[in-house]
């Protein structure tokens, strides 16, 4: 380690003068955005690193355990055989929103190269400042945020406990917060001779809830007392905490403004993207402010433009029925059940596209497919923490397949909410490689799953639930925009004007697409922005193209109230996309929406302690993997010829379901 004046290198390998002062946004020589990648150092030597020095002639030591990679264009050092302490970081990659990622290893040249493990995706801001601990931020947080932090910790308890890492959630200095989001600095192994339980977690929380906001203090204290004094189960605590979370969130108003657009780009011959809403969407469509979708027909899959449109229409068909059922419930629908519904809906969409491929006898590279990222704001009625009835619990559900992404952006940060389904991610999840090393592979960005390529049993899905408790923008986009980290580099310029009322959501969508066409112009681009506002301030008057929906809380009378095997993740192949549309029953040449106006008779399932039955949207199309009649009905409506053809090919007992589907 040597003392040095820190500079940072441009990541452009063709730059003639790559050395720049730390803090500059772009390279002075070639104007390439500079990458300031701050890392957290762990391991036996990390505590001995002196601030103001360099490690391995590359990593500048900013302060205790915080390093800056001054050569971010180079891959970090990784040993051939990965040390066992790095494996949990790889296995938990799906939780990257809350957990750090293993970046590489460093040495001062005198010790073993694995003595210092470097972590990226850590709770450190773009200037190298570490985010506060929960304890430091607790008293200034709102009531809903206090409960939301505890909810996130509880959701992490199971995946960390399964790997013997639950101690990570009990080290107070390890729990950091970036706005609403709980983030961990590193993972701590639980000693083998010590078994941690919810009682330990409750004891940790006791000190925090003692100073909780008045509206949630009693509820939190009761929950923590139950955790500390009884053998209560995780599900019971989660149910109680979720009820308190939604009751506190419902105190806030919620204003939603959504706009979207898709663009062919300057090079492509056709647009294989589809999105909802878009400029052609019906302004009276009840889904308009609730649902947002971006689909990217897979480049090289013949008929990708059809698959993306088919996915959008099929999702809309099912979400209409889901929301209709949710609004009729007299008790809260659990987040687990709603997540199951969204996952089941995507399986139905997958099988509808898959059936069209089978009908057309498409094989291998000829099969059409699409990525998808979708967000659904689900309104539920609930009695608030202060005792009145609200019509919205501020729940936002998110699901994705492929590499179309979702970001949450505020004035202070940009958070990637989704994980790509590509080869690099697969290598990390299977603990075969660190992410940065996996990115070097020539097939690193090849997709490992998309809708329509295979039977829905092979899909690996995970819907997420978020609570909207701050002003922010949800950005959904295809890789035409997200490639090369364009969103991470440009979010301040393209979203803060919307949050300050200086730009309409529609104009921001256009600006994002123009950026994509300028910087990543080799692809189609789709962007959907949802501006979510909970603060009392209103936008500067503008003339919007789409209406905004104001969901004010209304006071009403009180009412009673298995990881799949790697061999299943075959790579999706790419070829030139076909110009010819398939012979669909839908008139996809006419871009107007919606294409189906019927109400769907839902298939109902029962859940214990429910006053009503909730629609089970999807499962999987029954003729393919034994799903529900709603999936059959959707398939029959969208493509009756393929539906009947498949019915004739299945056993007699299964054919009886075809009649039910109609």
Image (cartoon, rainbow, N blue to C red):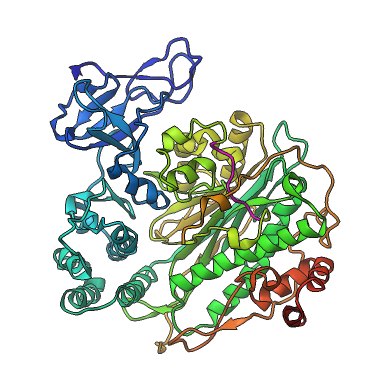
Residue 214 position (above or below residue 163):
below
- The x and y percentages for residue 12 are 48, 20
Foreground residue among 439 and 193? 193
Looking at the image, residue 310 sits to the left or right of residue 436; the answer is: right
Q: Is residue 544 visible?
A: no
- The x and y percentages for residue 62 are 22, 29
Asked whether residue 528 is drawn in magenta, I would say no
Q: Which residue is at the far top?
A: 16
What secondary structure characterizes most of the magenta part?
loop
The residue that appears at 48% across and 73% down in the rendered structure is 337
Q: How many marks?
A: 0
Q: Which picture quadrant has residue 322? A: bottom right
Viewport quadrant of the N terminus: top left
- The x and y percentages for residue 25 are 40, 26
Magenta stretch, residue numbers: 444-451
Viewport quadrant of the C terminus: bottom right
Foreground residue among 644 and 531? 644
Q: Is residue 54 visible?
A: yes
């Amino acid at each position: 380690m040597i003392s040095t004046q820190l500079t940072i290198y441009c990541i452009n390998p063709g730059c003639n003068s790559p050395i720049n002062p730390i803090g500059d946004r772009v390279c002075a020589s070639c104007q390439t955005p500079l990458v300031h990648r701050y890392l957290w150092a762990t391991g036996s030597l990390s505590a001995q690193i002196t601030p103001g020095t360099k490690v391995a002639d590359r990593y500048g030591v900013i302060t205790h355990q915080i390093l800056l990679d001054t050569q971010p264009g180079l891959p970090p050092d990784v040993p051939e055989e990965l040390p066992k302490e790095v494996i949990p970081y790889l296995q938990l990659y799906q939780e990257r929103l809350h957990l750090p990622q293993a970046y590489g290893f460093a040495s001062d040249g005198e010790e073993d190269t694995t003595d210092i493990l470097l972590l990226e995706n850590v709770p450190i801001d773009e200037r190298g400042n570490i985010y506060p601990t929960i304890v430091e931020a607790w008293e200034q947080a709102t009531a809903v945020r206090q409960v939301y932090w505890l909810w996130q910790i509880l959701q992490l308890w199971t995946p960390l406990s399964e790997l013997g890492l639950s101690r990570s959630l009990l080290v107070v200095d390890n729990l950091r917060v970036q706005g609403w989001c709980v983030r961990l600095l590193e993972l701590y192994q639980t000693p083998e001779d010590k078994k941690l339980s919810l009682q330990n977690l409750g004891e940790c929380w006791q000190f925090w809830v003692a100073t909780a906001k008045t509206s949630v203090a009693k509820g939190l204290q009761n929950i923590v007392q139950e955790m500390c004094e009884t053998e209560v189960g995780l599900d019971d605590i989660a149910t109680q905490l979720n009820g308190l979370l939604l009751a506190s969130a419902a105190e806030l108003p919620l204003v939603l403004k959504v706009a979207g657009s898709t663009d062919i780009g300057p090079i492509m011959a056709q647009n294989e993207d589809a999105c909802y809403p878009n400029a052609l969407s019906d302004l009276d469509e009840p889904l308009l402010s609730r649902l947002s979708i971006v689909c990217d027909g897979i480049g090289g899959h013949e008929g990708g433009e059809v698959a993306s449109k088919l996915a959008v229409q099929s999702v809309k068909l099912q979400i209409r029925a889901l929301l209709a059922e949710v609004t009729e419930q007299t008790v809260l629908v659990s987040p687990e059940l709603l997540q199951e519904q969204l996952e089941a809906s995507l399986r139905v969409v997958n099988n509808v596209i898959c059936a069209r491929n089978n009908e057309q006898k498409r094989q291998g590279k000829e099969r059409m497919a699409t990525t998808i990222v979708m967000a659904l704001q689900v309104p539920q009625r609930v009695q608030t923490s202060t005792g009145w009835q609200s019509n919205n619990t501020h729940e936002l559900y998110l699901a994705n397949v492929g590499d179309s992404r979702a970001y949450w952006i505020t004035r202070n940060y940009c958070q990637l909410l989704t994980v790509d389904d590509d080869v690099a991610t697969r290598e990390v999840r299977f603990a075969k490689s660190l992410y940065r090393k996996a990115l070097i592979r020539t097939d690193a960005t090849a997709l490992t799953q998309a809708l329509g390529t295979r039977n829905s049993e092979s899909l690996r899905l995970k819907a997420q639930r978020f609570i909207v408790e701050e002003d922010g923008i949800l950005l959904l986009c295809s890789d035409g925009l997200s490639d090369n980290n364009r969103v991470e580099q440009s979010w301040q310029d393209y979203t803060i004007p919307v949050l300050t009322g200086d730009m309409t959501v529609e104009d921001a969508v256009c600006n994002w697409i123009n950026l994509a066409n300028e910087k990543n112009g080799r692809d189609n681009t789709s962007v959907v922005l949802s501006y979510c506002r909970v603060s009392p301030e209103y936008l500067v008057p503008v003339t919007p193209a789409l209406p905004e929906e104001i969901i004010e809380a209304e006071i009403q009378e009180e009412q009673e109230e298995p990881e799949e095997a790697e061999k299943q993740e075959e790579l999706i192949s790419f070829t030139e996309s076909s110009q010819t549309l398939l012979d669909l029953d839908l008139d996809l040449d006419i871009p107007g929406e919606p294409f189906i106006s019927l109400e769907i008779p839902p298939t109902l399932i029962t859940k214990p302690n429910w006053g009503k039955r909730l629609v089970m949207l999807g499962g999987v199309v029954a003729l393919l993997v034994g799903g529900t009649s709603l999936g059959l009905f959707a398939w029959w409506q969208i493509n009756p010829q393929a539906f009947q053809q498949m019915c004739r090919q299945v056993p007699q007992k299964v054919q009886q379901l075809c009649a039910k589907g109609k």
